[in-house]
Amino acid sequence: MIKPIIEEKTVERIRSLVNSAGVIAVTCHMAPDGDAIGSSMGLAHVLQRLGKDVRVVTPDMVPRTLQFLPQMRDVTVLTQDEAAAREAISRAQLVFCLDYNRMARIDRLAEAVEMSRAPRVLIDHHLEPDEKAFDVMVSMPEASSTCELVVRLLLQLGMMNLVDRQAAQCLYTGLMTDTGNFTYGCDNPEVFEVASLLVRRRIDVPYLYRMAMNTYSADSLRLQGYALSEKMQVFAEQGAALITLTQDELTRFNYHRGDTESLVNKPLAIPEVKWVMFLREDTDRVKVSCRSKGDFSVKELCSDNFGGGGHNNAAGADFMGTIDEAVAIFYDILSSTALNCPEPSSPGPS
Ligand code: MN
């Protein structure tokens, strides 16, 4: 049984907003991941079947690994066509905000959304949503994914019959990617019931896994191999690992966004490693990405030291300093999370 956990009055407000809007925009966070674009496209398909004029608008490009999702060509990308993105928002009578908790997460798209008078409906599972930014909120940090919440909302709206194979592909993709193919964030058995409802739409589960989670270019595989063999430092006694990649190294391997997507998870395979930090040098910042297993939380570690945030086992930040400064912070954290700091293991043959 999937229990109705969204407040009935919230569901009814969303129903009446959808009923009275002919033109709807669905937005998601920048650098969209499987959950952001999957939930947006899945909801958009359903709203289209209700006869609505719907546009999915993203702040920037959807990564290549997610381009296989149905109707991706219909997505309006602000960095590709700013005028079209602004127009889609300004003509919308209702704006859905999926998989983000504050306007800063949609980058320059925020200007258009803030200028619009259309009501904003949040559906999201990140902590601490900015309550002032949204008119109606379905905010449940305990949910596995925004896709799970979209399915729950559709169930409570009595609209699951509108979820066809295309919508199910999108929604399953987000459920799968945000749970690492059902390996974390899915303690609640109802997550599998939600997945089951989607699999019933005769989606091709192995195909979706291969496309969304196990597709890499040769360059990307080589970059990951290099990172693990030459750039991974393991601090077994402190239960930590660090991987750094500089702009020069990324250029050497013809880096494209998404190429290091799951790299940060790899050191967690080492039994002694409880948490991992991956630092990727960008043009004007350092992308900080942390993962942990068990009770060790990386959320505070990312927010306190780098001004970022996230979940207990997966967090990140945009650090506006140099990669050397970020590494120095890592060592500070390392010495404060353990009393004795022996020499790190060799990062590999040089
Ligand atoms: Mn998500």
Image (spheres, helix red, strand yellow):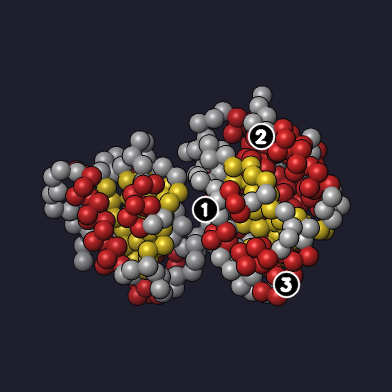
Mark 1 Cα-neighbour bin, 10 Å: few <14, some 14–19, many ≥20: few
- The mark that comes first in sequence, 1 or 2, is 2
Identify whether 118 is placed above or below 80.
above
**Would you say 187 lies left or right of 57 here?**
left
Picture disc at residue 119: none
> In terms of depth relative to the viewer, which is nearer, 17 or 193?
17
Assign the C terminus to one quadrant of the image. bottom left
State the separation of the CA atoms marked 1 and 3.
33 Å
Indicate which label's residue lies in the foreground, 2 or 3: 2
| Residue 204 point in image, percent of width and height | 67, 45
Q: Residue flagged by tag 2: what amino acid is it?
A: Ile
Q: Secondary structure at mark 1?
A: loop
333 horizontally vs 174: left or right: left
Sequence-earlier tag: 1 or 3: 3
Would you say residue 258 is visible in this rendering? yes
Residue found at x 49% / y 66%: 257
Is the CB of mark 3 within 8 Å of ligand 1? no
Q: Residues within 10 Å of mark 2 (few under 14, many from 20)?
A: some
Specify the label residue 214 is tagged with.
1
Please give the residue where the numbered disc 2 appears in the rendered image.
6
Circle 1: residue type: Asn
Q: Which residue is mark 3?
A: 84
Residues at marks 1 and 2, CA–CA distance in whole angstroms:
33 Å
Quarter of the image containing the N terminus?
A: top right
Task: Please indicate, yes or no, whether residue 65 appears anywhere in the rendered image.
Answer: no
- Number of marks: 3
